[in-house]
Amino acid sequence: MLKRILGATLMAASLGTASIAADAKPTDPQIAHIAYTAGQIDVTAAEQALKKSKNADVTEFAKTMERDHKAVNDQALALVKKLKVTPEDNPVSQSLSTQAAKELTTLEALDGAAFDKAYVENEVAYHKSVNDALANTLIPSAENKELKSLLETGLTLFKEHQMDAEHLVSMIK
């Protein structure tokens, strides 16, 4: 359990500005890429859970993660198209992707209740870290008002996801 939570925390901890450059804040194109990447990671994890889990509560949670994160990512894509901004790949996005691939491999090796518990615990840790990065790094660094607003809307939704995941962890034995 600690290894799983630590893995998710390390993955999302790379959302900090130090990963982009010392004392530099991420630019709007970098923020857009980071936010999209973080959302896509949760969509992919949810898709894995939908394939592996037989627990009705876990699959319902995964459906919510897939639906909500796809919707926010669709809004982000529409915004960058409207603003004619190209999201910029960066070390934070790359680190998130690398860590997520490792976590998916770890989860793939699990089945049944072990998978369910690990998936939901990972979701708690991941949402905590992403929410912290949104509140303390990405939103304050965003210069475009529409991007900032989208991030704030996402943060509100993702706080709900975190609470739902925390509740679900308490239900899974």
Image (tube, grey):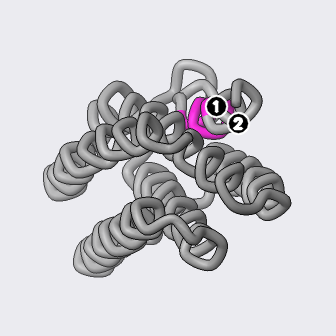
The residue at 47%/39% (across/down) is 169
Instruction: Decide whether the magenta segment is chiefly helix, strand or loop.
Output: helix
The residue at 58%/43% (across/down) is 122
Magenta-colored span: 9-15
Work out whether residue 167 or residue 12 is closer to the camera in this orientation and state it: 167
Question: Can you give x and y, in whole percent of width and height, for residue 17 in the image?
Answer: 53, 29
Residue 80 in sight in this render: no
At label 1, which amino acid type do we have?
Answer: Ile
Per the image, the residue denoted by label 2 is 4
Q: In terms of secondary structure, where does tag 1 sit?
A: helix
Which quadrant: the C terminus?
A: top right
Asked whether residue 14 is drawn in magenta, I would say yes
| Distance from Cα at disc 2 to Cα at disc 1 | 4 Å
Question: Can you give x and y, in whole percent of width and height, for residue 166 in the image?
Answer: 39, 36
The residue at 43%/54% (across/down) is 35
Per the image, the residue denoted by label 1 is 5
